[in-house]
Amino acid sequence: MTTYGRGSHNRYILPAAYVDAVRRAGGIPLLLPPGEERLEAVVRLLKAVVLTGGGDLDPDLYGGNRHETIYMVEPERDRSEIELARRVFDLGLPTLAICRGAQVLNVCEGGTLIEHLPDAVGETVVHRAPPREPIAHPVSVERGSRLAGILGATDFSCLSWHHQAIRRVAPRFEVVARAPDGTIEGLEMPSHPWLIAVQWHPELTAAEDPVQQRLFDALVEATGDRRTPAPDVQRRRPPDPA
């Protein structure tokens, strides 16, 4: 699981909800901070990848505009995760991409992003509460899609925590979920053995919502190495930034 970049206190961090969700699924989470130059050696140890949420990608990576709301741009993390994404595509590693992670995959394959959602789709659906807090909204998933099969649902409420989203979809992806305002909320890559990208944050409610936990369960199952979940996994949602 990728972590945030080096923070102001010289620390790499990741909200514990990601770790808890993987452990509940029976997986063993390993945290991968940005900046690792020996990715080939690291990837050989992995059976799956979670590209996590966080700050915005540098708009130069997709020919975007430098909107005033763009924040937490971390060039080192951008470079590391794009390189990791390329290996995910090449090796067919089971991959779950969440929020920023979905955007990384799309940009890596030549897609673009909406720099600030309210400018493009208005505010009939709020995707992030002010100043930067998660908020619930509905999502509809395409029937017959891999994502719908995993979740066991096509219409549900989820927690969202983003002000950007996918604008132009990269060629190898298919859109399989949207919010009521048309915002792209889910992508699949038919040519990949197991790759799911969602714009919402399933880890935030997975402890209480079986629909969201199924994403992590299915990811671990895809590795063929699911173990008994740890008995003491925390089941609370921490108030960390997206």
Image (tube, helix red, strand yellow):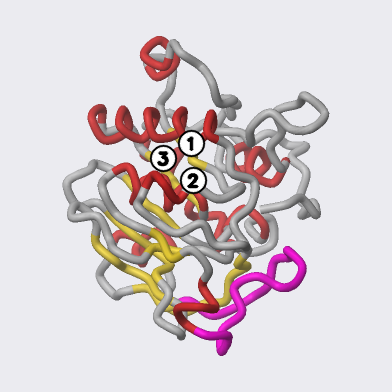
User: In screen coordinates, is 218 left or right of 68?
Assistant: left
* Residue at screen point 40% across, 10% down: 41
| Label 1 – label 2 distance at C-alpha | 7 Å
Residue that carries the numbered disc 3 in the rendered image = 221
Q: Nearer the viewer, residue 163 or 210?
A: 163
Q: Earlier in the sequence, mark 1 or mark 3?
A: 1
Element under disc 2: loop
Residue that carries the numbered disc 1 in the rendered image = 78
Magenta stretch mostly in which secondary structure? loop
Nearer the observer: mark 3 or 2; the answer is 2
Please tell me the numbered disc located at residue 58.
2
* Residue at screen point 67% across, 57% down: 204
* Residue at screen point 78% across, 44% down: 234
Nearer the observer: mark 1 or 2; the answer is 2
Other residues around mark 3 within 10 Å, as few (<14) / some (14–19) / many (≥20): some
Q: Position of residue 233 (x, y in %)?
A: 74, 40
| Label 1 – label 3 distance at C-alpha | 28 Å
Nearer the observer: mark 1 or 3; the answer is 1
Q: Are marks 1 and 2 in contact (CB under 8 Å)?
A: yes
Q: Position of residue 3 (x, y in %)?
A: 61, 33
> Is 71 inside the magenta-drawn segment?
no
Q: What type is the residue that disc 3 sits on? A: Glu
Q: What type is the residue that disc 1 sits on? A: Asp
Q: Nearer the viewer, residue 17 or 42?
A: 42
Work out which quarter of the rendered image holds the N terminus and state it: top right
Q: What type is the residue that disc 2 sits on? A: Asp
| Outermost residue toward the bottom in this view | 124
| Label 3 – label 2 distance at C-alpha | 34 Å
What stretch of residues is rendered in magenta? 122-139
Classify 91 as above or below 38.
below
